[in-house]
């Protein structure tokens, strides 16, 4: 999708500043997990109002203590852990070969050099 011809990355450099159609937000708000992550909780709304941000951001957002058990967070953590475990497994399996390549070849023992021999 993003790699297709009509995609222009330049258009999205400041996309955080762009507004989007209201119907998009309405559609996304039908998804419970979206609403939990997008909206604020009552405590956060109180903080916002206290610093002069009166906008209505919704009140169904997660509390900080709820984030660790939030489904999308758990899924992301599981994916990161799986990727790390796979990376670690590949690195550990590659170590013997890397070590073998780095070790200098042992030279055969040669007779004593006569010039350094004590007489």
Image (tube, rainbow, N blue to C red):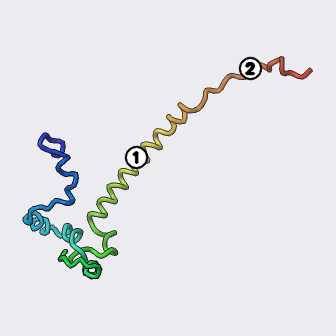
Spot occupied by residue 31 in the image (x, y as percentages of width and height): 15, 67
Q: How many numbered marks have been drawn onto this rendered protein structure?
A: 2
Query: Label 1 crowding class (10 Å Cα cut-off): few <14, some 14-19, many 20+?
Result: few
User: What residue is shown at x 34% (from left), y 60% (from top)?
Assistant: 77
- Closer to us: 80 or 64: 64
Dot 1: element: helix
Classify 10 Å Cα crowding around label 2: few (below 14), some (14-19), many (20 and above).
Answer: few
Q: Secondary structure at mark 2?
A: loop
Taking the spot 32% from the left edge, 55% from the top edge, the residue there is 79
**47, above or below 12, in the image:** below
> In the displayed structure, would residue 15 be above or below residue 113?
below
Q: Is residue 30 left or right of residue 45?
A: left
Whole-number angstrom distance, CA of label 1 to CA of label 2 = 44 Å
Left or right, residue 86 beside residue 56: right
Q: Position of residue 35 (x, y in %)?
A: 19, 70
Q: Which residue is mark 1?
A: 87
Label 1 with label 2: CB-CB less than 8 Å: no
Instruction: Identify residue for label 2.
Output: 110
């Amino acid at each position: 999708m993003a790699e297709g011809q009509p995609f222009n990355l330049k258009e999205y450099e400041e996309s955080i500043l762009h507004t989007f159609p209201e119907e998009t937000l309405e559609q996304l708000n039908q998804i419970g997990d979206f609403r939990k992550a997008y909206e604020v909780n009552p405590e956060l709304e109180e903080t916002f109002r206290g610093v002069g941000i009166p906008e209505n951001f919704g009140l169904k957002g997660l509390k900080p203590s709820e984030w660790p058990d939030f489904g999308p967070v758990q899924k992301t953590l599981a994916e990161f852990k799986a990727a790390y475990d796979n990376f670690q497994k590949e690195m550990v399996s590659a170590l013997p070969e890397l070590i073998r390549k780095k070790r200098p070849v042992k030279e055969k023992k040669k007779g004593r050099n006569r010039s350094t021999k004590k007489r």
